[in-house]
Image: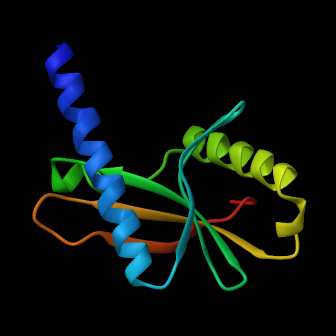
Amino acid sequence: MIEDRRRRWRFGRRAELLCTLALRLKGYRIVARDLRTPVGEIDIVARRGRTVAIVEVKGRGDPSAAGEFVQPHQRRRIERAAGWLLQAHPEWAALDWRYDVILVEPWRPPRHIVDAWRNDD
């Protein structure tokens, strides 16, 4: 059980690293990775121009499971964490914010879903 948990954790870390590399290749600057706030966690905060992307990484060993995306309770947690981040960086208030998801599946390139949801969804 503990070994299985470690394996999943290592897979997740590798998936996040792969996603940061893919985002950099697309011209994003990685502002934060594994950002832990008092109200939740954000996998990746990336910025390109006037856009701040709050990125949730979904890495799964099973390709069908990776497509489950982000559940409503996870969205709320990420949105709360993004709100905390905005309070910590008020100079970013004038920028465009969005929520992205990157799906990572074995033996496939990461699939970047831009603007995966909005706060009012």
- Location of residue 53 (image quadrant): bottom right
Is 101 displayed left or right of 40 in the figure?
left
Is 61 displayed left or right of 58 in the figure?
left
Q: Position of residue 33 (x, y in %)?
A: 51, 52
- Location of residue 93 (image quadrant): bottom right
Is 64 displayed left or right of 20 in the figure?
left
For the residue pair 84 and 33, the one nearer the viewer reads as 33
Would you place residue 28 above or below residue 87 in this image? Answer: below
Residue 8 seen in render: yes
Q: Residue at x 66, y 43 (%)?
A: 76
Q: Position of residue 24 (x, y in %)?
A: 43, 76
Would you place residue 10 above or below residue 109 in this image? Answer: above
Please identify the quadrant where the C terminus is shown. bottom right
Would you place residue 22 above or below residue 38 in this image? Answer: below
Q: Please tell me how many numbered marks the rendered image carries.
A: 0
- Location of residue 25 (image quadrant): bottom left
Q: Which residue lies furthest to the top in this view?
A: 1
Q: Position of residue 5 (x, y in %)?
A: 24, 24
